[in-house]
């Protein structure tokens, strides 16, 4: 899980924070509230998740509870992995 | 008539009807009216005078709506600043219009506080939410919004009117061609005229439930509230379209009847896999403006929302709205942005300034009572777009947009006279982004262009030449921009070059840069 956490943080920091502010992003920070993602940001995130973790994300899953923080992402990926098994 | 009377009339007519829904808050017309009156009295008690400018720097929220109407009731002029605006630009805007007060949220104080000493005219800062950190600044008076409302609990009647309808009501800042934003001056009459015309053709009534994710700093978003309140409708404000699924669920759960879009949102909706036709039986209309929808998107949108009336519209902040295509014409003229809105005249002028006949391409000119009074304290820029009209003293608006008109008066957009970029429905002046790029000491030359993009309409691309020996990367450039520009203005891509192509007169040739750039694909289509 730690590896996944690192990958997710790296993706968010590289793509949405342009490589800065890593230390200011905690795992429970809401991307929306922090102004980190907008609608195209969420799409970019989904494309990344689908490729990186070979999962298929349904429209219904595009909600903050699944995607709006590092913590939520970790829980969501774990859940998806369990379903796949 | 003045704008605040939209609210006052609906509060008399439908006191207990839901006016506004923001996340878990639902307010009836009477509640909003009373709270706005209390806040208006508080503003007056703070010394706000007729015509003072008050900035609203808030996300889409109940507080933002209360602020707008309270400012108007106090006889002052509101300006809503995009909530993603960074400190330097915020300071520029507040200083440009010499804002007397600022209404913001505790969460945004971090952006505000460092620049306070530079904001010489700002006297009052009204803060929603809980202030966690003490702010030290002797020269400005901080007032918690809740405290002001509590102090004026009894003042639920509107204050005495201080304005007439030709007084200024709002400044709406747009990206300026000189690098700095400019404030579009709108009077009560301008806004009331536009709002009435639009609600007329959209056939809005008190039965409407309108869901808007557009920021109130964008006139299209602002008018959703103003127009909704003018007919006694319910307005649902959402802070973002980021989680599309949340919005779709709200469309169903709240029985939404009106859903304003920009092309980027339409493109995202059309990417959804699980959306089936007829899912929103209450939805009566969808509107689109800011940029034209591609005909293929109109067709797919209509298939997805079969019983919904789709309005293609065109406008610019300087007069709010120019034209709309009646939905029954959509199939016959998908490429048209329609005819003049009610109570507006449009015509096309050729290069010598004469009215051009059907089929001829020329600049679109707009006549009506909704034309702005000018750009705030920018007489030269104002004179470039507001020119004498047919009646003594009248001004007509030269839009800078090239159009042609068919025999029946339907308009077809051809292009811009200048290089303004339209991205995510917002106008961005390349000069404004270039000015930020040139603020990097390492940047020797910079050019900003718009690249066609299936989701954004145009994606902003920066091409830079660094001074010799610079080791910065593309990402450093984007980070620099993200710290200074609103989110929609930050370049989506950066290219570093050794030189930029030049014209024979030595100017940077954007044309060549554009030709050398393939269309972008900001997000791979699902």
Image: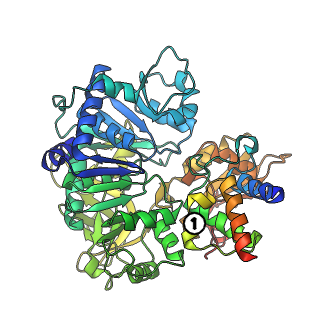
**Residue B382 coordinates in the image, percent (x, y):** 35, 45
**Residue B440 coordinates in the image, percent (x, y):** 70, 41
Q: Residue at x 56, y 62 (%)?
A: A63
Q: Residue at x 43, y 24 (%)?
A: B122
Q: Secondary structure at mark 1?
A: loop
Say which quadrant the N terminus of chain A sits in. Answer: bottom right
| Residue B287 vertical placement versus B90 (above, below) | below
Q: Can the viewer see residue B454 in this picture?
A: no
Callout 1: few (<14), some (14-19), or many (20+) C-alpha neighbours within 10 Å?
some
Q: Residue at x 56, y 35 (%)?
A: B87
Say which quadrant the C terminus of chain A sits in. Answer: bottom right
Q: Can the viewer see residue B214 in this picture?
A: yes
Residue at the extreme bottom of the image, as rendered: B332
Classify residue B339 as left or right of residue B502: left
Q: Which residue is mark 1?
A: A62
| Residue B287 vertical placement versus A69 (above, below) | below
**Residue B464 coordinates in the image, percent (x, y):** 71, 53
């Amino acid at each position: 899980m730690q590896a996944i956490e690192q990958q997710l943080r790296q993706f968010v920091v590289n793509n949405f924070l342009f490589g800065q502010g890593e230390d200011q992003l905690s795992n429970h920070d809401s991307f929306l509230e922090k102004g980190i993602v907008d609608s195209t940001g969420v799409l970019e995130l989904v494309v990344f998740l689908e490729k990186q973790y070979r999962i298929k994300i349904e429209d219904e899953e595009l909600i903050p509870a699944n995607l709006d923080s590092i913590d939520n992402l970790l829980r969501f990926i774990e859940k998806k992995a369990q379903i796949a098994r | 008539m003045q704008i605040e009377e939209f609210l006052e009339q609906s509060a008399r007519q439908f006191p207990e009807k839901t006016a506004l829904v923001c996340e878990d808050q639902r307010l009836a017309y009477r509640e909003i009216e009373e709270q706005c009156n209390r806040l208006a009295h508080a503003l007056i008690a703070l010394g706000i005078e007729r015509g003072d400018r008050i900035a609203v720097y808030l996300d889409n929220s109940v507080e933002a709506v209360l602020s707008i109407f309270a400012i108007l009731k106090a006889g002052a002029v509101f300006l809503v600043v995009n909530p993603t605006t960074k400190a330097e630009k915020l300071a520029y805007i507040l200083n440009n219009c010499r804002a007397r007060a600022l209404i913001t949220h505790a969460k945004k104080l971090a952006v505000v506080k460092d620049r306070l000493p530079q904001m010489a005219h700002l006297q009052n800062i009204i803060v929603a939410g809980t202030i966690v950190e003490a702010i030290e600044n002797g020269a400005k008076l901080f007032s918690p919004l809740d405290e002001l409302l509590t102090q004026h609990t009894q003042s639920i009647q509107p204050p005495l009117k201080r304005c007439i309808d030709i007084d200024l009501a709002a400044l709406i800042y747009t990206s300026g061609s000189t690098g700095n934003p400019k404030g579009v001056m709108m009077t009560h009459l301008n806004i009331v005229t536009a709002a009435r015309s639009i609600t007329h053709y959209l056939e809005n009534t008190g039965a409407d439930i309108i869901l808007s994710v557009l920021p109130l700093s964008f006139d299209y978003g602002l008018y959703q509230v103003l127009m909704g309140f003018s007919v006694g409708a319910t307005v649902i404000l959402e802070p973002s379209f980021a989680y599309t699924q949340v919005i779709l669920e709200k469309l169903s759960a709240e029985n939404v009847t009106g859903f304003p879009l920009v092309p980027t949102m339409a493109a995202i909706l059309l990417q959804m896999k699980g959306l089936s036709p007829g899912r929103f039986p209450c939805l009566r209309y969808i509107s689109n403006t800011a940029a034209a929808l591609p005909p293929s998107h109109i067709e797919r949108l209509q298939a997805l929302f079969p019983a919904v009336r789709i309005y293609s519209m065109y406008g610019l902040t300087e007069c709010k709205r120019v034209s709309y295509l009646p939905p029954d014409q959509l199939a016959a003229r998908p490429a048209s942005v329609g005819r003049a809105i009610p109570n507006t005249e449009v015509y096309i002028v050729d290069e010598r300034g004469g009215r051009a006949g059907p089929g001829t391409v020329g600049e679109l000119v707009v006549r009506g009572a909704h034309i702005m009074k000018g750009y705030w304290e920018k007489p030269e820029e104002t004179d470039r777009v507001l020119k004498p009209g047919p009646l003594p003293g009248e001004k007509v608006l030269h839009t800078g947009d090239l159009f042609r008109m068919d025999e029946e008066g339907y308009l077809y957009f051809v292009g811009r006279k200048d290089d303004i970029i339209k991205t995510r429905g917002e106008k961005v002046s390349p000069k404004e982004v270039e000015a930020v790029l040139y603020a990097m000491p390492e940047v020797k030359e910079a050019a900003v262009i718009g690249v066609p993009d299936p989701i954004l309409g145009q994606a902003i691309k920066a091409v830079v030449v660094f001074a010799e020996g610079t080791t910065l990367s593309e990402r450093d450039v984007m980070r620099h921009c993200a710290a200074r520009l609103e989110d929609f203005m930050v370049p989506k891509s950066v290219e570093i070059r050794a030189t930029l192509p030049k014209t024979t007169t030595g100017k940077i040739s954007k044309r060549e840069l554009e030709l050398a750039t393939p269309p972008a694909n900001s997000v791979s289509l699902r």
